[in-house]
Structures are given as C-alpha cells and as structure tokens.
Amino acid sequence: MSRLAAFFGVVWMLFGVAPAAALELNLKGDFIQGGLVVGTAPLGSRILLTGASVPVGANGDFLIAFGRDTPAAQVLKVFIPNAPSIIRKLTIKKRTYNVQSIEGLPTRSVIPAPEDLKRIRIEGKALAAARAVISDDNSFRSGFSWPAKGRVSGIYGSRRILNGKPRNPHYGVDVAAPKGTPVHAMAAGRIAFAHPGMFFNGKAVIIDHGLGLTSAYLHMSAITVKEGARVKKGDMIGRIGQTGRATGPHLHWGVRLRATPVDPALLVGPME
Ligand SMILES: [Zn+2]
C-alpha cells in the first residue's frame, strides 16, 4: 500500500465515508410561478412545502411545484431521521399573464346545456381520479421534450374570454398543427387515462410520470396507446385533432404536479 493510500485509509476510518454528502438537499428547477422543481433528500426524509406534505420516493426523490398565483414566500422543511432538519426559505418569482379572447366556439361548448352538466361532472371526476394517484416512480428522470411540433397558439396562465364570457385561466400550452400530426409522450411514464371523447377535452390521454406528476394531451383525432401501457420519452401516443372544445386542430398540452398546474413550456427548451 502506498503512503497516499494508507493516509486516505486512516482518514476513512476516522471520519467514515460520506455522511455529509448523504445529508445534502438537492433542488433543480424553476423557482417561478408555474415552475417545477425536482429534488433529492436523504433517505427516509419527511418534507413539507409551506405546511403541505410532499410525497417522497423510496430513493429520496421528490417534486414540488408553484401554481399560477403562488405567493412569493415559501418554506421547504426537510425532516431527516437522526439528523438536524433542513429549512430553506424559497422566493418564487411572480409572473404577469395576458388575456386571450377566443370567438367562434359553439355556444353549447361555452354555456353547456343542462343535460351536458352531468356528463361534464362524471368526466371531471374520472380525470381527477387518474391525476390523484401518487406512484413511487421516477420516470420523470427521463427528462422532458415537446410532445408535438407546430405553432404555439396558447400559453400557460392566460386569462380566457371565450365567446365574450370570462372563463378559467389557460393551464397549458397549445400547439397548432395539421390534423394527424403525431403526438409524443413528453417523458417516460404509464398511460393513466385514455378517453375516446370528453365534452371539453375530446380524445384525451393522461400520462403518470411518478410522484404525482402527470401530463395531459387533449383534443386529439386518434389515441394510439392503451391505459396501463408504459411509454418512453418521445413514444407516439396519438395524433393532433380538433375533438372537444376547439376552434381548429391543435394539441392542448397540460402538466400538473398533483393538483397544481405547471407551465409545460418551462420544462423544455425552445422548440427545434
Ligand atoms: Zn389549450
């Protein structure tokens, strides 16, 4: 054994291997309204984001996100077994949102008929149930890519005026492209939901990427995957269409972390 190796051997015995590294907290992402942050905490940690419990994977992975109107001051608390807690004050950057007016939608898609409301409620519940599953899966580690190529015709957070009526903000990115253009999974995951025709969303697919991160692909003309199937990042899942409430062929691409809508555009770079 060389003197150098012997020296490091002694250091090893005195101080142990890497307890300091094991207690680190890693955070990577966008600390901005609509942003997603991927974190790693020491094994067995319990985490709170401003008082709300954050699911932690068996490997220490966790995800946090900031909503469209999240207040700037947030606190991340990480309780580590047999070690001091980590408390991080986070400052979330504020955004301003534009107003998007869309005219020419069929009246019934903006002011649903009484007989439509029951259907809308049932479909909404099924969608929420698919999104409520928290799987201990780190498929999101595949990274993210644009699900389709085309013109971006709608962005995250816009206030919406539909046929002159104020409606919910737009929680997604719209990509306009000809009917039939392929739609791809933004990341690896499992097909959590595939619906042949929803009142608002038309042909819709939801992919579960783990720890409550889901992506939605709406208004498609065709779905080419089955519920329960596993997909890799970039796998084809359907084709662009104009089903549900839409004025032209486009993909509505939405991303949520549990109940919080995330801005998909922050997950990917400029479209190539
Ligand atoms: Zn949209």
Image (cartoon, rainbow, N blue to C red):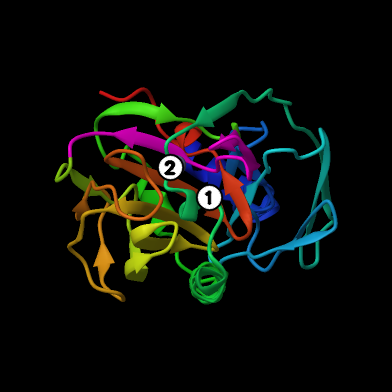
Amino acid type at circle 2 is Leu
Q: Quadrant of residue 269?
A: top left
Position of the C terminus by quadrant: top left
Residue 18 in the image, given as x and y percentages of width and height: 61, 51
Q: Nearer the viewer, residue 155 or 73?
A: 155
Depth check, front residue: 243 or 57:
243
Residue 135 at x, y percent in the picture: 50, 72
**Which segment is the magenta one?**
160-178
Is 197 on the left-hand or right-hand side of 24?
Answer: left
User: Residue 139, image x and y in percent?
Assistant: 39, 58
Left/right of residue 235 with respect to residue 116 in the rendered view = left
**Location of ligand 1 given as a quarter of the image:** top left
Q: Nearer the viewer, residue 172 or 55?
A: 172
Say the numbered circle drawn on residue 245. Answer: none
Q: Is residue 76 visible?
A: yes
- Decide: is 19 above or below 181: below
Q: The residue tagged with tag 1: helix, strand or loop?
A: helix
Question: Residue at (54%, 34%) from the top-left corner?
Answer: 156
Q: In the displayed image of the protein, which residue is found farthest to the left?
A: 180
Point out which mark residue 110 bears.
1
Residue lying at 67% horizontally and 46% vertically, measured from the top left? 25
| Mark 2 CB lies closer than 8 A to ligand 1 | no
Label 2 crowd (10 A; few <14 / some 14-19 / many >=20)? some
Residue 228 against residue 113 in the figure, above or below: below
Q: Position of residue 128 (x, y in %)?
A: 55, 69
Is 170 in the magenta? yes
Check if residue 59 falls in the magenta segment. Answer: no
In this rendered view, identify the residue nearer to me: 219 or 225: 219
Please state if 264 lies on the left or on the right of 191 as rendered. right
User: Which structural element holds mark 2?
Assistant: loop
Give whichever of discs 2 and 1 has the lower sequence position: 2
